[in-house]
Amino acid sequence: MTVKTETKSGLKWGWDLGEDGWKDGMDENLLSLGRFAYHLTVVDRNVADPSTLTPADGDTYIVAASGIGVWAGWDGRVAVWDDTASVWASAVPSVGWIAYVQDEEVLCAYKSAGWSTGIAI
């Protein structure tokens, strides 16, 4: 069976027993769940250049417009620092994702037009 991708979550499924690629695909699924499937809290949503940061493991950002460096082309995506691998992982948000933005103390939602301005809480 050809591996499929679930539309809402982006998780992969449908491997045949013993099929190649299962381990890597499942590792991606588990990392995605750990990074993005819980209540999303981001440090900031106004950073475009990750080289200006000294992130701790798990630090999460909404990439600002005109992302540069490793964030080039990631505008509006959610970026998470993986300290073990020393890399940024990203996910394209789906309509309905909600994030708490720590530095602004607001909740914002992802809509078809992008992230909302947020409401103070």
Image (cartoon, helix red, strand yellow):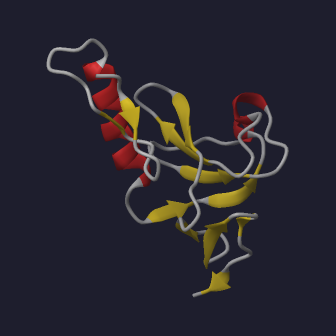
Among all residues in the image, which is located at the extreme top? Answer: 20
Q: Is residue 65 left or right of residue 54?
A: right
- Percent coordinates x, y for residue 6 in the rendering: 40, 44
Quarter of the image with the C terminus is bottom right
Which residue does the image show at 50% across and 27% down from the upper left? 86
- Percent coordinates x, y for residue 71 in the rendering: 71, 36
Which residue does the image show at 61% across and 52% down from the upper left? 61
Among all residues in the image, which is located at the extreme front? Answer: 1
Quarter of the image with the N terminus is top left
Q: Quadrant of residue 23?
A: top left
- Percent coordinates x, y for residue 91 in the rendering: 55, 44
Among all residues in the image, which is located at the extreme right? Answer: 66
Q: Give 42 or 4, whichever is nearer the viewer.
A: 4
Tally of numbered tags: 0
Which residue does the image show at 43% across and 50% down from the upper left? 9
- Percent coordinates x, y for residue 58 in the rendering: 45, 46
Eyeballing the image, is 38 above or below 1?
A: below
Eyeballing the image, is 120 above or below 79?
A: below
Q: Quadrant of residue 39?
A: bottom left
Q: Quadrant of residue 30?
A: top left
Q: Give 53 or 37, whichever is nearer the viewer.
A: 37
Among all residues in the image, which is located at the extreme left? Answer: 17
Q: Is residue 86 left or right of residue 112?
A: left
Q: Give 32 or 86, whichever is nearer the viewer.
A: 32
Q: Is residue 120 left or right of residue 15?
A: right
Which residue does the image show at 78% across and 45% down from the upper left? 48
Eyeballing the image, is 65 above or below 50?
A: below
Q: Is residue 108 left or right of residue 13?
A: right
Q: Give 82 or 30, whichever is nearer the viewer.
A: 30
